[in-house]
Image (spheres, rainbow, N blue to C red):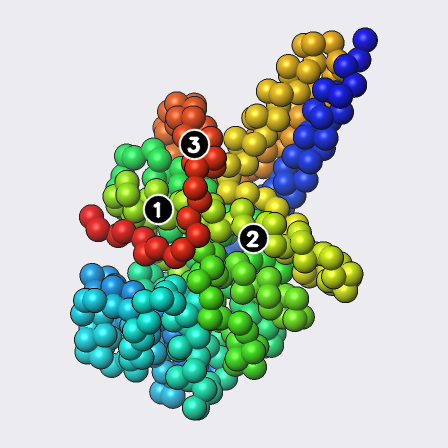
Amino acid sequence: MLHYPFWSAAMFMAALACVPAVIFAVECITGSLRPARKRAPDEQEAGEREVALAVLVPAHDEEDGLAATLASIGRQLQAGDRLVVVADNCTDRTAAIAQQAGAEVVERDDPARRGKGYALSAGIAHLSAAPPPVVIIVDADCTLAPHALDRLAEAAATSGGPIQGRYLMQAPVLGKLDLAVSEFAFTVKNHVRPLGLARLGLPCQLTGSGMAFPWAVLAKADLANGHLVEDMKLGLDLARQGSAPRFCRDAVILSQFPQTRRGLDSQRRRWEGGHLAIIGTAVGSFRNVRLVLQRAYVAMVLDVLVPPLTLLVLVLAMVWAACAVVALSGSGLLPLTLATVNVALLCAATLAAWQAHGQRALPARALGRLPVYVVRKMASYPGALLGRRPTDWVRTDRKS
């Protein structure tokens, strides 16, 4: 005899979990297909760039790594380009280091309005006196691969819309499994899935650094906010206005994960808390029927429904366990079947992404330790999710 309420609840959970599982699988598998002709971006020599640009670097207490970032940017600037650093509520030598590097410096002191969004707004206000054709945003802890600025600027000028480069974070300490898994998860989020969307002719999310905008697009954007994932919010806002971001795989921007446990945890909480908040906002926006008719915006909202990889694993595992309990009670196998399909899609997509793009970050020899990592990670999530999520922007601790 079917216990209909329990069967219905299990079926609803399995069907709901099917949405992020299918989206994740389609993006990862498409992004993991080998191109007909493999090419390395660094092997393509760029000619003289015809598009002038301004590089905008928001910085809050970044004296330790800012000089290296500005040197990396400076090597790719041409005559007529500009480099602007916004020293936002700084208490260290960030402004002085930027001045020594030859950058235009905007010093901002407003402790009540902190965060990257406010810093970007101040930088745009500074540039508005003589607007450049293209503005490229680079975080203060990044380095650029060769020709990254050229490719971003040319793509933005040609498309007339926002461009997101391939922004990757690398693990600074070898041998730590959690860092290796984090690097792989970041690669899936910022490379594999956007590449899959690009191959399907769809836009991608803005991921924070290596973002290029035609001036006309960025000037009308709402930047002055303290949202935890201001880049994702900006991408969705622009998509609503008809300027959805596109992915540029050949423009590579690199950064490193924090080396301290405190830094890793605060960064992860900010990303995950901000992402969960964005999901509710994005789904709620469909109350506006006009947005439902915008293919690019709908594609971006569907992409937002996929939570961070480790959280997705936890959700699908919990749904599978609940459906298994219902099946064992004699209430029917259909929910468990659907939940099993969801888990299989997750495994197949993750394996495809790892084989194509993840073996450098997560070597095969580390896979044997993954079950212990997954169990530990899953055990920590309930407390993190049920606890108070961050609502205010907090700088990531990057001390070694």
- Residue 152 position within the rendered picture, expressed as x and y whole percent measured from the top left: 48, 70
Tell me where residue 129 appears, x and y as whole percent.
Answer: 43, 91
Question: Residue visible at 44% across and 44% down?
Answer: 389
Relative vertical location of residue 118 with respect to residue 342 in this rendering, above or below: below
Q: Secondary structure at mark 3?
A: helix
Q: Quadrant of residue 47?
A: bottom left
Residue 269, relative to residue 294: is it above or below? above
Label pair 3/2, CB-CB below 8 angstroms: no
Q: Earlier in the sequence, mark 1 or mark 2?
A: 1
Q: Residues within 10 Å of mark 3 (few under 14, many from 20)?
A: few
Q: CA distance from mark 1 to mark 2?
A: 18 Å
Q: Nearer the viewer, residue 67 or 363?
A: 67
Q: Which residue is mark 2?
A: 278
> Would you name the residue on which mark 3 appears?
383
User: Mark 2 packing: few (<14 Cα in 10 Å), some, or many (20+)?
Assistant: many
Q: Residue at x 34, y 42 (%)?
A: 265
| Left or right for 87, reference 337 | left
Q: Quadrant where the N terminus lies? A: top right
Query: What's the distance in space between the residues labelled 3 and 2, CA to CA?
Result: 21 Å
Q: Nearer the viewer, mark 1 or mark 3?
A: 3
Q: Report which residue position mark 1 lands on.
A: 266
> 36 above or below 153?
above
Q: Residue at x 62, y 60 (%)?
A: 203
Choose top left, top right, bottom left or bottom right for residue 262: top left
Q: CA distance from mark 1 to mark 3?
A: 15 Å
Viewed as shown, does residue 193 lie left or right of 17?
A: left
Tag 1 near tag 3, CB within 8 Å? no
The three-letter code of the residue at mark 2 reads: Ile
Q: Is residue 223 above or below residue 37?
A: below
Question: Disc 3 vs disc 2: which is toward the camera?
Answer: 3
Q: Amino acid at mark 1?
A: Ser
Q: Looking at the image, can residue 19 be seen?
A: yes
